[in-house]
């Protein structure tokens, strides 16, 4: 038997020295083209070559949607704690501290009142950088307080979602936030105020199964992954390879889960038009329908349901405006 073992190592070709982008430059995850930070800033984080939508942070979303100087934070004084003294490979408090240091945020949800194209709105944005945008107790409480602020100001609600779901480090307390956010939206609907959800990449788990898909109108960005369980988990469960379009925004739209897929450059204008339609329903409710007007039942497609919801909002808003409801 030989006393020594010979190991042959073959180095992979690392390409020419200029193949790696330098400082301030990164490659598009879809097409591989190098992009400067200035290019991405001008295009609001969208690749000018292939229209791939890079993830945006919560402050960047606020800067895109809120009119300059109009932002007023709601619930920013609420801070997360470690109610279960949770420890997996690391302590939960350490993970929280690291996320806060890296993102500059105190929690995954940034919420506040602002103006969108001159229209007062309540705006909430989930930041995926903060523990995967997961929903814990503070996220649920901030969402509830944001809805209360919207009701107090008679303002519509807009929420941009990007989340991996419930936060496992808070156990059942995290799962309870699904019910809490649903109840909050019932309070908003009782006041006849519109709610529009924008689903960004990715939106999954308990967030998708609660407030993200309970809006009057559901909008998504192109290519966003929208599903309860991710493709890898599903493939491991059913032991089959999924198609590449599984869970993507375009497939969700084709199957009636969404109302529209909107490019990021058109998002603010689209939200303004949607809110104008939903809030303008009050005037429409004062005018009787023509005899030849077709009434679309609620059991129709997503757009038919949205149209029916507009009418419901109009009628409830009319009663509220004229003091018919408490």
Image: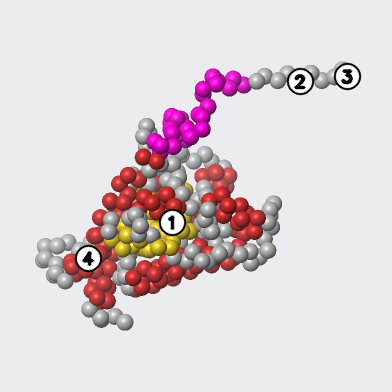
- Residue 301 can be seen in this image: no
- Is 326 within the magenta? no
Is 155 rendered above or below residue 221? below
What count of labels does the image hold?
4
Give the SS element for disc 2: loop
Taking the image as shown, residue 113 lies to the left or right of residue 130, namely: left
Residue 72 image position (x, y, % from top left): 40, 63
Is 118 rendered above or below residue 240? below
Mark 1 surroundings: few (<14), some (14-19) or many (≥20) residues within 10 A: many
Q: Which residue is mark 1?
A: 125
Marks 4 and 1: in contact by CB < 8 Å? no
- Residue 25 can be seen in this image: yes
Marks 2 and 1: in contact by CB < 8 Å? no
Q: Give the label on residue 3, or none.
A: 3
Q: Which residue is mark 2?
A: 7
- Identified at 25% across, 64% down, the residue is 279
Mark 2 surroundings: few (<14), some (14-19) or many (≥20) residues within 10 A: few
Residue 143 image position (x, y, % from top left): 45, 65
Please state the extent of the stretch shown in magenta in the rendering: 12-40
**Between 166 and 302, the one nearer to me in the picture:** 166
Taking the image as shown, residue 151 lies to the left or right of residue 318, namely: right
- Indicate which disc, 2 or 4, sits on the residue closer to the N terminus: 2
Give the SS element for disc 1: strand
Q: Which residue is mark 4?
A: 281
- Indicate which disc, 1 or 3, sits on the residue closer to the N terminus: 3
Gap in angstroms between the C-alphas marked 1 and 4: 26 Å
């Amino acid at each position: 038997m030989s006393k020594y073992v010979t190991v042959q190592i073959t180095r992979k070709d690392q390409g020419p020295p200029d193949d790696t982008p330098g400082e301030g430059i990164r490659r598009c995850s879809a097409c591989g083209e190098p992009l400067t930070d200035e290019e991405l800033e001008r295009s609001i984080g969208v690749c000018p070559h292939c229209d791939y939508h890079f993830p945006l942070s919560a402050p960047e979303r606020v800067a895109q949607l809120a009119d300059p100087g109009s932002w007023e934070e709601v619930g920013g004084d609420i801070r997360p704690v470690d109610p279960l003294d949770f420890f997996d490979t690391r302590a939960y408090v350490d993970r929280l501290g690291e996320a806060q240091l890296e993102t500059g945020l105190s929690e995954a949800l940034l919420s506040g009142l602002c103006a969108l194209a001159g229209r007062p709105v309540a705006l909430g944005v989930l930041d995926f950088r903060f523990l995967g945008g997961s929903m814990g107790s503070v996220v649920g409480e901030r969402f509830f307080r944001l809805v209360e602020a919207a009701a107090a100001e008679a303002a519509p609600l807009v929420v941009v979602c990007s989340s991996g779901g419930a936060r496992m480090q808070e156990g059942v307390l995290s799962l309870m936030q699904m019910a809490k956010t649903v109840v909050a939206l019932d309070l908003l609907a009782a006041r006849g105020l519109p709610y529009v959800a924008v689903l960004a990449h990715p939106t999954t788990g308990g967030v998708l199964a609660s407030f993200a898909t309970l809006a009057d109108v559901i909008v998504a960005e192109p290519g966003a992954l929208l599903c309860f369980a991710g493709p890898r988990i599903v493939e491991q469960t059913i032991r089959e390879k999924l198609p590449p379009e599984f869970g993507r925004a375009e497939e969700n739209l084709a199957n009636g889960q969404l109302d529209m897929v909107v490019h990021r450059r058109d998002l603010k204008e689209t939200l303004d038009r949607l809110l104008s339609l939903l809030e303008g329903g009050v005037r429409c409710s004062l005018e009787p329908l023509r005899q030849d007007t077709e009434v679309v039942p609620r059991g129709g497609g997503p757009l038919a349901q949205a149209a029916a919801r507009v009418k419901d909002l109009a009628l409830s808003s009319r009663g509220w405006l004229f003091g018919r409801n408490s």
